Amino acid sequence: MEYSGAEIWRIILLLGIGTFLIRYSFLGLLGDRPLPDWLLRHLRYTAVAILPALITPLVLWPQATGGETDPARLGAAAAALAVGYLTKNPIWAILSGLGALYLLLYLIG
């Protein structure tokens, strides 16, 4: 489908307004008020849920292999999970997964 220049700018403007309203609904309207304890308890798990949600498709259906699951990425994910579980440190988990991926890609080919 071919879009004209005006249609593209209209889409960009509407997406910008939508993004602003989504962020303002949380930061602008609730930013200076104390949040209830139940909501704060749930917000603590947001970061823990986002990283696996971003990584899982890249491990199971990587674009580099044409969507085929490969042992190098599964091994790197397992190494990152193990290090993250043992150390409770996300930086070490990410670095160990990165190192394991490069090592396994070198060894497996």
Image: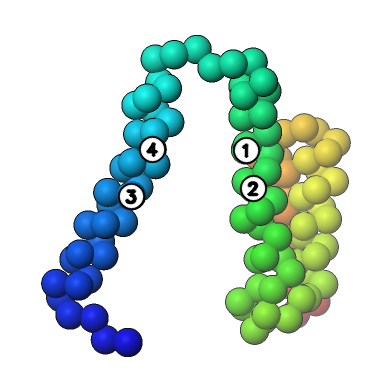
Q: Which residue was labeled with disc 1? A: 47
Question: Disc 2 residue type?
Answer: Leu
Q: Quadrant of residue 38?
A: top right
- Residue at (70%, 60%) from the top-left corner? 56
Q: Few, some or many C-alpha atoms within 10 Å of disc 4 (few <14, some 14-19, many ≥20)?
A: few
- Residue at (40%, 21%) from the top-left corner? 31
Question: Disc 1 residue type?
Answer: Ala
Q: Nearer the viewer, residue 104 or 11?
A: 11
Residue depth check, mark 1 versus mark 3: number of the one nearer the observer:
3
Task: Tell me whether circle 4 and circle 3 mark residues in contact (CB < 8 Å).
Answer: no
> Which quarter shows the C terminus?
bottom right
Residue depth check, mark 2 versus mark 3: number of the one nearer the observer:
3
In three-dimensional space, the C-alpha distance between marks 4 and 3, rounded to whole angstroms, equals 9 Å
In three-dimensional space, the C-alpha distance between marks 4 and 2, rounded to whole angstroms, equals 20 Å
Task: Tell me whether circle 1 and circle 2 mark residues in contact (CB < 8 Å).
Answer: yes
Q: Nearer the viewer, residue 14 or 90?
A: 14
Task: Tell me whether circle 1 and circle 3 mark residues in contact (CB < 8 Å).
Answer: no
Q: Which residue was labeled with disc 2? A: 51
Q: Which mark is residue 18?
A: 3
Task: Tell me whether circle 2 and circle 3 mark residues in contact (CB < 8 Å).
Answer: no
Q: Which residue was labeled with disc 4? A: 23
In three-dimensional space, the C-alpha distance between marks 1 and 4, rounded to whole angstroms, equals 17 Å
- Residue at (81%, 43%) from the top-left corner? 83
Earlier-in-chain disc, 4 versus 2: 4
Q: Few, some or many C-alpha atoms within 10 Å of disc 1 (few <14, some 14-19, many ≥20)?
A: few
Question: Disc 3 residue type?
Answer: Gly
Q: Quadrant of residue 42?
A: top right
Question: Disc 4 residue type?
Answer: Arg
